[in-house]
Image (cartoon, rainbow, N blue to C red):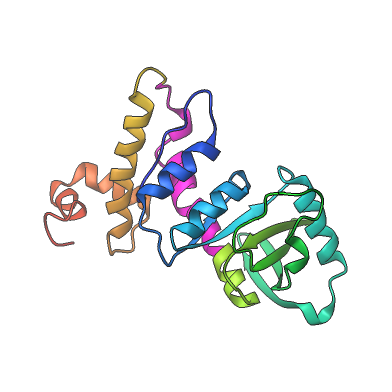
């Protein structure tokens, strides 16, 4: 966890994300964000900072989403590259089919009206189609992305997977291990301050080099002062 930005009560993440990006050293990085950030302003902010973006595309960009859906439904074979990966575990089998295209010139220019905003530096569009088999049932989901980086299918698959690792290793843990969603702090700066405290606690727990689960590390740090000091990097682990 490197930084956070509170969202004003009468605003949303689209105003907070550029403010957070301005405070982070993102030059040379590939910045992945959910569909809330899929707008030309945020894309431009990332590119101007010397980084690349990988943004999810959903129905909040209806025209872009529909155009990409149509393209990948019938994309010319010489314009796309694909990669299929398989995962098995926890009683489920998942097949992820990745398709990317660097042919994006048809998405540029004044296609519908003069001055139509477009995404800065757009170089790659991608699609992930996930099929999950569990308990005798099968479900399929398609996710779409745009990027300013020139990505092949392997790099695209790695970037998308890494984004979901953040979801699993940060947001899910904050909710399940720290019960963040159950917090009743609502007054003043309480919620924001406790979010900072949770991140301060979570970061060193992730850095401990042992085979214990995060839950066990938390418990042991509460029971054993020497282990707590080791977690805080005041004594060797």
For the point 64% across and 54% down, the residue is 56
Magenta stretch encompasses residue 179: yes
Give the residue at x 67% y 61%: 92
Instruction: Please provide percent x and percent y for residue 179.
Output: 43, 35
Q: Is residue 153 magenta?
A: no
List x then y, in percent, for residue 189: 34, 24
Residue 155 x %, y %: 57, 74
The quarter holding residue 233 reads bottom left
Q: Quadrant of residue 147?
A: bottom right
In the shown orientation, is residue 55 left or right of residue 175?
right
Task: Please identify the quarter of the rendering in which residue 6 is found.
Answer: top left
Q: Does the image show residue 81?
A: yes
Q: Furthest residue to the bottom?
A: 78
Could you tell me which residue is drawn at 40 percent across and 59 percent down?
26
* Predominant SS along the magenta part: helix
Q: From the viewer's perspective, is 85 left or right of 193? A: right
Q: Is residue 12 above or below residue 21?
A: above
Taking depth in this image into account, of 104 and 163 the one nearest to the observer is 104
| Range of magenta residues | 161-185
Quarter placement of the C terminus: bottom left
Image position of 214 (left or right of 106): left
Q: Nearer the viewer, residue 44 or 213?
A: 44
């Amino acid at each position: 966890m490197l930084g956070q930005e509170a969202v004003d009560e009468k605003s949303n993440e689209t105003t907070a994300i550029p403010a957070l990006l301005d405070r982070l050293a993102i030059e040379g990085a590939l910045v992945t964000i959910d569909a809330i950030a899929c707008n030309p302003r945020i894309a431009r902010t990332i590119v101007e900072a010397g980084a690349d973006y990988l943004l999810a595309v959903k129905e909040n960009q209806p025209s872009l989403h529909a155009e990409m859906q149509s393209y990948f439904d019938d994309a010319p074979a010489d314009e796309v590259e694909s990669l299929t990966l398989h995962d098995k575990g926890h009683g489920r089998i998942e097949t992820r089919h990745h398709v990317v295209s660097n042919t994006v010139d048809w998405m540029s220019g004044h296609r519908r009206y003069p001055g139509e905003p477009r995404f800065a530096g757009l170089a790659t569009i991608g699609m992930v189609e996930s099929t999950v088999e569990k308990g005798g049932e099968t479900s399929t989901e398609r996710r779409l992305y745009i990027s300013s980086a020139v990505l092949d299918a392997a790099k695209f698959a790695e970037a998308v997977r890494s984004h979901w690792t953040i979801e699993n290793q940060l947001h899910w843990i904050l909710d399940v291990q720290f019960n963040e969603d159950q917090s009743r702090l609502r007054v003043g700066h309480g919620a924001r301050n406790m979010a900072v405290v949770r991140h301060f606690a979570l970061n060193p727990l992730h850095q401990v080099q042992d085979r214990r689960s995060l839950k066990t590390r938390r418990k042991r740090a509460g029971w054993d002062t020497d282990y707590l000091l080791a977690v805080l990097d005041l004594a060797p682990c």
